[in-house]
Image: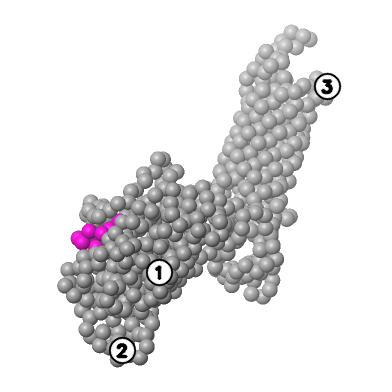
Amino acid sequence: MLFSLLLPIATAGSLGTAKEPRDLDRVYEPRRVAVVIGVDGYDDPALADLRFAAKDARDLSLVLDDEQLGGFDRVLTITAPEATTRASIEQALDFATSDLQRDDTFLLYLSGHGTLTIDPVDGTELWFLPSDGELGEARTTGIPVAWLEERVADVEARRRVLIMDTCHNGREGSRSALDSGTAAVLDQLRGEPPAPRGAREVSESEARLFAAQYYQPAMEDPELQNGVYTHFLIQAISEGAGDADLDGDGLVDVTEAHDWARDRTIGYTGGMQVPRAEYRIVGREDIYLAGSDATRSAAEKALVAATDQLLASARVLVDGQPRGVLPEVVAVEPGTHTIEIIDANDRTLVKRTTRLSAGETLMVEDLFPRTTPSIEVIGGGLYRHGPGAGVWHTSAPELEVALVVPAVGPRWIEPDLHLRTSFMSGAVEAEPVDVTAGNVTLGGTLALRPTRFPVTVGPALDAGVQWRVFEDFDPASQQMQVHRQLGPAIAVGGRTSVRIPLGQRYLVARYDIRTVPYAYSDIATSYVQHGIGIGIGQHR
């Protein structure tokens, strides 16, 4: 029901497309979503219609939607009068951001009239005027710029951009207007009006771009057929991308695009319009406005982050150099680095050399060795071959219960103790009779974890008993007799285990190879035994 109500609003005047995911994996891939709004016409006769605000929105949308330029997955372009009312804009924002996730990118662009109000208590407040806004009633019909900043900052997406091609000084020929009361107050002021108060500070991985200082005009130009700042911003991520890409990485990030557009706006307007920006960009959170998916992925840095409150205020050193203080996110270039965490008392909590991949987020908690033991229950099968294997069943089922104790020894050792048993009944290769056989052993593995991945490998030793029971013909008595054989089972070999987290539990898969000595008819022999198993582990 909600979707059907919002769809006409979201698509009114829309040029963008939503690229449908081809499979379930695509649904969870990071997405790039933009809402682009341009307001030309106003219901209030006190607000002169603008010439290029809607065109600005459409032109920018085309660039963002182009797979070879902006590469945005979904661009919602809103320019129709009925879709640019205050209520419709708020609904469109809710609609566009409702399904965003942590690794997504969100961009909001607005072009239209702005205004400001001055209050002895509240000070200066800036407003964006929707198509149903009234110049004399900005407080009740306009959209506060501070609210827009809050709204973008609260979006679930990790990377967020707010771009506003509007102004608030009321000068003729600009994208702003002032009511008579505010204009009279400003006329009595000496110098520029006081700066607005109460705006939310820019958050990490967030950028706010403004076409002009709040007291300057944001101009439209008939020759450019656009707002001046928007014209050069579009250039920066399209035909001018090669020059705007100052670091030559094949991408234009939000700072490069703004710097390109700012410099050319200043030059074009003779300094009458000076765009401004606020950023707080961290590591791989560089917000790219132009460049291919492959280039963006390759350019991402790794992040070091923490959620444990006990780590708050701890310093992060990378290769011996201070890089930040938790809980802020620290950007690290991909590669092998030594990460050191030092608390407020200058104590080293952990120091570990690890390899970081592009786009990876390393949680500091994962640097600490796991100290809590876990219990694993594993079912699998055995396969035997070699000289003595003929008197045993070639294959047999096996059950194992293991206790993993990572607190023993250095962090890269994850030893385990395990109890295992197998049982089989049926004919064997060397004897055309039914044989019932099995074993029970207790053993241990000195498992080493050579990489960051949840893979361990190491030597194993098992000791216990094995038995065989079978019927055989006794020539002396000329009768069938039951033979029982019981002997030691000592196995030496190795084990590889893989553990994959599943919430509070984890999936474990393991492979064993071992040599088992055995005496048959007083002849010492042995066989090689392979074991493959899969099961569930639970941390205690």
Let me know if residue 82 is in the magenta part. Answer: yes
Circle 3 crowding by C-alpha within 10 Å: few under 14, some 14–19, many from 20: few
SS at circle 2: loop
Q: Are marks 3 and 1 in contact (CB under 8 Å)?
A: no
* Chosen colour scheme: one colour
Mark 3–mark 1 distance (CA, rounded to whole Å): 98 Å
Q: Is residue 94 visible?
A: no
Residue at image mark 3: 523
Q: Quadrant of residue 433?
A: top right
x and y percent of residue 423 in the render?
Answer: 63, 29
Looking at the image, is mark 2 or mark 1 earlier in the sequence? 2
- Residue in the foreground of this view, choosing between 365 and 298: 298
Q: Amino acid at mark 1?
A: Tyr
Image height of 268 relative to 437, above or below: below
Circle 1 crowding by C-alpha within 10 Å: few under 14, some 14–19, many from 20: some
Q: Is residue 34 left or right of residue 365?
A: left
Mark 2–mark 1 distance (CA, rounded to whole Å): 37 Å
Q: Nearer the viewer, mark 2 or mark 1?
A: 1
Q: Nearer the viewer, mark 2 or mark 3?
A: 2
Residue at image mark 2: 120
The residue sitting at 69% across, 60% down in the picture is 338
Residue at image mark 1: 268
The residue sitting at 58% across, 64% down in the picture is 330
Q: Amino acid at mark 3?
A: Ile
Q: Amino acid at mark 2?
A: Pro
Bounds of the magenta span? 77-84
SS at circle 1: helix
The residue sitting at 33% across, 82% down in the picture is 124
Let me know if residue 11 is in the magenta part. Answer: no
